[in-house]
Image (tube, rainbow, N blue to C red):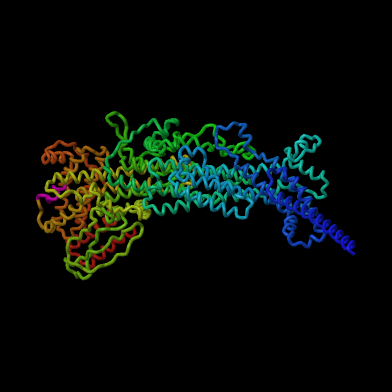
C-alpha cells in the first residue's frame, strides 16, 4: 500500500512538473509577446524599420491566436494585451503618420535665409527631396494594408491623402510660431532681437514649439497657447521694434516652403519611373533606394496582390486638395494680422497721444517701408497661391486685404494726426511772408519734349517749378540710415515677376531669391513722367462757371478753370536782382506744410495703394485747413464769411409801412431780408411791424456786405460755397476755425489802441500785408495740388484716384475766386469800410439840406488820407508785396472805398436834391484825392517821405462811375427809374435798389402803398433774375 501511494505521488509530482513546465513555457511566450508588443508600440528610430515591424505584427497576431486556442482565452489579465494586439495595425498606421509628420516638419524647417549659401547647399535644402523616407513609408503602408486582407483600396488611398493634407495644414499653422520666434535673419542687425529682454521667455517658447506632438489630439490647443505668448511678447512688449514686416516676410517664406513641399510630393506621385521614361525594362530595386511612385506600384503588383492599387491616383487627389491647403494658408495670414490688430489696439487704447503712431520724422518712413514690403509680399503670395491652385485670378481675398488695410490705416492715422498738428502750429506761427520759388522755363516736364506752342504756355513752367518743390520734399531725402540699410533685406521685390516659369519647380524658395539689382530707396522719388501742358491762353479770372471739355487722353478733363488758375499766377512771376525768374506767392505753410505732407502722403499712396482714398482724404483735410484758415483770417469771423460767400445776407432792407397812410413822411420798416440769401433758392419775404423813419440800420457784417457777390456773380459762387461747406464738415471736430479770429497777427481787433495815428495805420497796413500774402498763397496751394494730381495720375490708374481727382479739380476751380474774395474783404476791412458807412450816415441833416454846399464832407479827406498812409507803408515795407500783388491791393482798396460809399449812400432814406448833389461831390473829391500825384502829395505833406506813386486808377466795373450812376438815378422820373432798375438790377444788390426807391419816395412824396408796390416789383426782378 505504501508503494502504491508513493507511486501515485511520483505520478502527481511528474504531472505537476509537466504542468509547471507548460505554464512556464506559456508565461515565457506571453512575456515574449508582451515584449514584442511593447517594441511595436514604441516609435521606430528609422522609417526603414516599418517593413520588419509589419512582419513582426503578423507573427504577433499568429502567436496570440495560438495562445487564444486553449484555456488561456479565459484569462482576464490578458484582455488588454489581446486588444492591443488586435489593434496593432491601427497603431502602426498612427506611427507611420507620426513619422510622416516628423519628416515633413523636418523638411519644412530646412530653410536658410542666408544670401551667401552656395548653390550646392541650396540643392541640399530645397525641393521635395523626400523620396527615400516617403517611399519607404508609403510602401510600408501598402504592405500593412495587404496584410489586413480584404480592404477597400479607395478608403486606404483617400485616408492617406486626407492625412497628407491635414499634416501640411498643421505644419502651416506651426509656421506662425516659427516666424514669431525667428523673424527674417537680417532683421536682427537692425532691431537687435538677440538682445531682447524677453530672451529667456522666447527660449522657453522655442523649446515648447520644438516639442509639439503633431499627432497628439491636444496639439492645436498647445499651439494656441504658445502663439498667444509669442503674440504678447512681439506685439505688446516689443511693438516699438517694428518687427511686423520681418515676421510677415518669414511667414511668407515658411508657408511658401510648405506649399513647395506639398507640390513636390504631388509631383513625385505623378512622375513616371526613370526606366519607363527611357523605354528600358524595369529593374527591381528596394524601397530604400530612391523608388518612384511607379516603382512602388510595380512592386506591389509583383508581390501578388489581387487588389488594383492605383497609387498614382494620389497625385490627382493631392491636386484636388490644393485649394484646401491654399485657403488654409490664407486663413493663417488673416488670423495673424487679426491678432496683431487686437494686440496693438489694446496698447493704443492706453496711449493718450496719437502722435506716437506716426513715429516722428524718419521713423514713420521706416514703418512705411515695412508696410510696403508687407503689401508687396501679400501680392506676391497671392500670385504664388493662384499659381499653386491654377487660378488666373490674382485678386487678394477681401478679408485679407481688409486686415492689411486696417494696419495701413493705423499708420496713416498717426501721419494724419502729426500732419494736422504740424500744419496747425505752422499756421498759428506763420509770418505770412511770401517766399520765392525759382522758375526755370527750360527744365522739368518741358525739357524732354519738343518745343511747341503748348509747351510754352505759362502753366508749364509753373508746374515744373512746383514739381521740383514736391520732389525736394520727397520723404526719402530725409530718412535715417535704417531705411537705406533696409534695402539689403528687401531682396524679394522682383523674384516673382517672371510669369513664364513655374516657381514651384525652381530650386530656391522664391521669397529668398536675391534680385539681380536690389532697389535703392534713395533713388525712389516721385514720378517725373511728362504731363499735359495748358491748352489755351491766359484768361480773365471770373466767378462764372467755365465750360468743361473732354479730351482724348484716357478721359481726363481739361478745363478753362485750370487756365484761369495759372493765368492768375503768371503775373506774379518776376525777375529777381540776380536775373532769375521767381514766383513769390509761397508761404512757410505751403512749402513746409502742404508741399511736405503732400509729398509724404503721395509716397504712402504709391507704397500702399489699398488706402489711396484714405490718404487722399488726409491731403484734402490739409488743403481744406489751409484754404479755410486763410478765408477766415481775411473775413474776420464766421458771419462775415457766410455773407462774403453769398450764403446769407447781413444787411436788412427798409420798406414802407402799410400804416404810413398817404403822408410823404410815412413810416418805414427795417427788417426785410434779401431775397437772394443763398445760391439758386430765393427766400420768402417777411413783413415786420413798422418803425419810425430813420436811416436804414447797419449790420455787424457790413464789411462783408460791401464786397459780397452781386446777383450776376451768384451762380459762379456755387462751387466755392459747396467747397467751403464741405470743408467745414470734413474738419468738424479736428479744427476750430474760431481760434483763427483771435490770432493777433492778422486780426483787426488786435490793432493796438494808441493815440498815434501813424502807429495804428502801420499796424493795420501790416495786417493787410499779411492777409494779402495769405490770399495770394492760395493760388500756390491750388497749383501745388494740381501738379500733385498730375504726378499721381502718372503713377497710378485713374480709377483708383477718382475721388482725389475730383477734389483737386474743385480746388483748382475755386482758388482764384477764394483768393479774390479774401483780398477784397481784407482791403475793405483795412480801409475801415464799416466806419465809412457810419460816417456817411452820421452826416445827418446835411443830406436833407435844400442848399448846395461848396465843399465835400470831412470823411472824404479822411478816406483819402487813410488810403495814402496804407499805400505808403505797404510800398515801403521790408516785407514788400510783389509788385503785382501791391498793385492789385491798391486797386481793391480804391474799389472797396467806392463800394463803402455806395453802401453808405444806399442807407440814406431821407435825401434832398442838394443832398444828392453833395454825394456826387464827395465821389468826385475822393476820385481826385486818390490820383497817384495826389497820394504822393498827401504822403509828403503828412509823413514827410517820398514814396513810390501808386498805380493809376483803373476803369473798374465797380468804381467811380458805378457809384455815381447809382447816385444820379435818384433824379430819374418814376418810370425811368424802374426801367433803369430793371436793366441794371443784376449789378447792384437788392438793398441798394430798395434804398433808392425809399429815398425817392420820401423826396417825391409817394404814398406808402405805392412805394410798397414798387418794392415788390423790384423784388420780382431779382427773383426772376
Q: Is residue 522 above or below residue 297?
A: above
Quarter of the picture containing the C terminus is bottom left
Looking at the image, residue 399 sits to the left or right of residue 931; the answer is: right
Query: Which sits in the foreground, 687 or 445?
Result: 445
Horizontal and vertical percent position of residue 439: 35, 33
Looking at the image, residue 916 sits to the left or right of residue 273; the answer is: left
Asked whether residue 302 is drawn in magenta, I would say no
Looking at the image, residue 379 sits to the left or right of residue 862; the answer is: right
Horizontal and vertical percent position of residue 699: 22, 58
Query: Which sits in the foreground, 888 or 850?
Result: 888
Q: How many labels does the image show?
A: 0
Which residue is outermost to the top?
578
**Residue range (magenta):** 854-864
- Residue drawn 70% across and 40% down? 131
The answer to which quarter of the image holds residue 911 is bottom left
Horizontal and vertical percent position of residue 241: 44, 44
Asked whether residue 858 is drawn in magenta, I would say yes
The answer to which quarter of the image holds residue 1023 is bottom left
Amino acid at each position: 500500500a505504501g508503494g502504491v501511494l508513493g507511486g501515485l505521488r511520483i505520478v502527481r509530482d511528474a504531472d505537476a512538473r509537466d504542468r509547471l513546465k507548460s505554464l512556464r513555457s506559456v508565461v515565457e511566450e506571453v512575456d515574449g509577446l508582451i515584449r514584442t508588443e511593447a517594441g511595436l508600440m514604441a516609435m521606430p528610430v528609422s522609417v526603414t524599420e516599418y517593413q520588419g515591424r509589419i512582419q513582426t505584427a503578423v507573427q504577433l497576431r499568429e502567436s496570440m491566436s495560438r495562445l487564444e486556442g486553449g484555456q488561456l482565452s479565459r484569462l482576464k489579465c490578458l484582455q488588454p494585451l489581446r486588444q492591443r494586439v488586435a489593434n496593432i495595425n491601427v497603431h502602426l498606421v498612427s506611427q507611420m503618420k507620426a513619422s510622416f509628420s516628423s519628416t515633413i516638419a523636418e523638411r519644412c524647417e530646412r530653410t536658410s535665409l542666408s544670401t551667401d549659401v552656395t548653390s550646392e547647399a541650396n540643392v541640399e535644402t530645397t525641393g521635395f527631396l523626400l523620396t527615400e523616407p516617403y517611399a519607404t513609408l508609403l510602401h510600408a503602408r501598402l504592405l500593412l494594408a495587404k496584410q489586413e486582407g480584404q480592404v477597400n483600396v479607395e478608403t486606404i488611398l483617400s485616408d492617406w491623402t486626407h492625412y497628407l493634407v491635414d499634416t501640411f495644414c498643421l505644419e502651416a499653422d506651426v509656421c506662425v510660431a516659427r516666424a514669431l520666434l525667428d523673424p527674417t535673419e537680417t532683421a536682427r542687425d537692425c532691431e537687435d532681437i538677440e538682445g531682447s529682454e524677453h530672451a529667456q521667455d522666447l527660449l522657453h517658447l522655442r523649446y515648447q514649439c520644438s516639442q509639439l506632438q503633431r499627432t497628439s489630439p491636444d496639439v492645436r490647443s498647445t499651439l494656441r497657447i504658445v502663439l498667444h505668448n509669442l503674440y504678447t511678447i512681439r506685439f505688446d512688449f516689443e511693438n516699438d521694434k517694428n518687427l511686423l514686416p520681418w515676421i510677415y516676410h518669414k511667414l511668407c517664406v515658411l508657408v511658401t516652403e510648405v506649399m513647395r513641399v506639398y507640390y513636390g510630393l504631388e509631383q513625385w506621385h505623378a512622375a513616371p519611373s526613370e526606366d519607363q521614361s527611357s523605354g528600358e525594362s524595369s529593374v527591381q530595386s528596394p524601397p530604400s533606394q530612391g523608388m518612384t511612385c511607379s516603382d512602388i506600384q510595380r512592386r506591389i503588383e509583383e508581390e501578388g496582390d489581387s487588389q488594383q492599387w492605383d497609387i498614382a491616383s494620389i497625385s490627382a487627389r493631392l491636386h484636388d486638395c490644393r485649394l484646401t491647403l491654399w485657403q488654409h494658408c490664407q486663413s493663417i495670414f488673416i488670423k495673424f494680422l487679426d491678432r496683431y490688430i487686437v494686440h496693438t489696439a489694446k496698447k493704443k487704447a492706453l496711449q493718450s497721444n496719437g502722435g506716437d503712431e506716426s513715429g516722428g520724422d524718419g521713423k514713420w518712413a521706416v514703418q512705411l517701408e515695412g508696410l510696403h514690403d508687407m503689401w508687396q509680399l501679400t501680392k506676391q503670395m497671392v500670385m504664388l497661391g493662384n499659381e499653386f491652385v491654377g487660378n488666373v485670378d490674382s485678386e487678394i481675398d477681401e478679408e485679407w486685404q481688409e486686415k492689411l488695410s486696417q494696419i495701413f490705416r493705423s499708420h496713416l492715422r498717426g501721419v494724419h494726426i502729426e500732419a494736422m498738428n504740424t500744419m496747425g502750429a505752422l499756421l498759428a506761427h506763420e509770418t505770412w511772408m511770401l517766399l520765392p520759388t525759382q522758375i526755370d522755363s527750360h527744365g522739368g516736364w518741358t525739357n524732354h519734349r519738343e518745343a511747341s506752342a503748348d509747351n510754352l504756355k505759362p502753366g508749364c513752367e509753373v508746374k515744373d517749378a512746383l514739381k521740383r518743390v514736391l520732389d525736394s520734399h520727397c520723404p526719402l531725402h530725409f530718412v535715417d540710415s535704417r531705411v537705406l540699410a533696409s534695402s539689403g533685406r528687401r531682396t524679394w521685390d522682383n523674384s516673382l515677376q517672371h510669369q513664364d516659369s513655374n516657381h514651384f519647380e525652381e530650386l530656391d524658395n522664391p521669397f529668398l531669391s536675391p534680385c539681380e539689382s536690389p532697389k535703392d530707396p534713395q533713388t525712389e522719388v516721385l514720378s517725373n513722367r511728362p504731363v499735359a501742358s495748358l491748352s489755351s491762353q491766359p484768361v480773365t479770372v471770373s466767378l462764372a462757371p467755365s465750360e468743361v471739355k473732354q479730351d482724348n487722353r484716357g478721359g481726363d478733363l481739361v478745363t478753362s478753370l485750370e487756365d484761369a488758375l495759372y493765368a492768375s499766377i503768371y503775373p506774379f512771376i518776376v525777375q529777381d536782382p540776380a536775373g532769375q525768374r521767381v514766383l513769390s506767392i509761397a508761404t512757410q505753410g505751403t512749402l513746409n506744410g502742404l508741399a511736405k505732407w503732400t509729398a509724404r502722403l503721395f509716397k504712402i499712396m504709391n507704397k500702399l495703394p489699398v488706402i489711396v482714398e484714405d490718404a487722399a482724404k488726409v491731403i484734402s483735410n490739409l488743403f481744406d485747413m489751409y484754404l479755410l484758415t486763410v478765408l477766415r483770417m481775411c473775413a474776420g469771423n464766421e458771419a462775415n464769411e457766410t455773407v462774403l460767400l453769398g450764403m446769407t445776407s447781413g444787411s436788412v432792407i427798409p420798406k414802407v409801412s402799410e400804416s404810413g397812410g398817404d403822408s410823404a413822411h410815412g413810416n418805414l420798416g427795417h427788417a426785410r431780408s434779401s431775397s437772394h440769401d443763398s445760391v439758386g433758392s430765393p427766400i420768402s419775404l417777411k413783413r415786420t411791424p413798422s418803425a419810425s423813419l430813420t436811416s436804414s440800420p447797419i449790420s455787424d457784417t457790413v464789411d462783408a456786405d460791401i464786397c459780397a457777390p452781386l446777383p450776376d456773380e451768384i451762380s459762379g459762387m456755387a462751387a466755392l460755397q459747396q467747397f467751403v461747406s464741405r470743408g467745414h464738415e470734413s474738419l468738424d471736430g479736428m479744427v476750430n476755425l474760431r481760434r483763427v479770429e483771435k490770432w493777433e497777427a492778422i486780426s483787426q481787433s488786435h490793432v493796438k489802441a494808441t493815440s498815434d495815428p501813424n502807429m495804428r495805420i502801420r499796424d493795420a497796413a501790416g495786417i493787410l500785408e499779411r492777409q494779402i500774402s495769405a490770399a495770394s498763397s492760395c493760388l500756390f496751394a491750388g497749383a501745388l495740388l494740381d501738379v500733385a494730381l498730375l504726378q499721381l495720375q502718372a503713377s497710378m490708374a485713374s480709377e483708383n484716384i477718382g475721388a482725389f481727382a475730383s477734389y483737386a479739380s474743385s480746388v483748382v476751380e475755386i482758388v482764384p475766386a477764394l483768393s479774390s474774395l479774401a483780398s477784397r474783404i481784407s482791403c475793405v476791412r483795412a480801409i475801415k469800410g464799416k466806419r465809412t458807412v457810419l460816417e456817411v450816415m452820421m452826416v445827418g441833416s446835411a443830406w436833407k439840406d435844400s442848399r448846395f454846399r461848396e465843399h465835400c464832407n470831412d470823411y472824404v479827406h479822411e478816406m483819402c488820407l487813410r488810403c495814402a498812409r496804407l499805400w505808403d507803408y505797404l510800398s515801403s515795407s521790408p516785407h514788400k508785396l510783389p509788385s503785382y500783388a501791391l498793385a492789385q491791393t491798391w486797386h481793391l482798396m480804391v474799389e472797396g472805398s467806392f463800394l463803402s460809399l455806395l453802401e453808405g449812400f444806399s442807407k440814406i432814406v431821407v435825401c434832398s436834391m442838394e443832398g444828392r448833389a453833395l454825394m456826387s461831390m464827395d465821389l468826385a473829391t475822393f476820385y481826385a484825392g486818390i490820383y497817384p500825384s495826389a497820394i504822393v502829395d498827401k504822403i509828403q505833406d503828412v509823413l514827410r517821405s517820398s514814396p513810390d506813386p501808386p498805380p493809376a486808377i483803373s476803369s473798374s466795373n465797380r468804381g467811380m462811375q458805378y457809384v455815381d450812376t447809382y447816385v444820379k438815378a435818384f433824379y430819374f422820373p418814376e418810370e425811368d427809374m424802374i426801367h433803369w432798375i430793371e436793366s441794371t438790377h443784376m449789378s447792384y444788390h437788392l438793398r441798394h435798389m430798395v434804398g433808392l426807391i425809399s429815398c425817392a419816395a420820401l423826396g417825391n412824396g409817394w404814398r406808402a402803398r405805392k412805394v410798397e408796390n414798387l418794392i415788390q416789383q423790384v423784388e420780382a426782378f431779382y427773383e426772376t433774375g
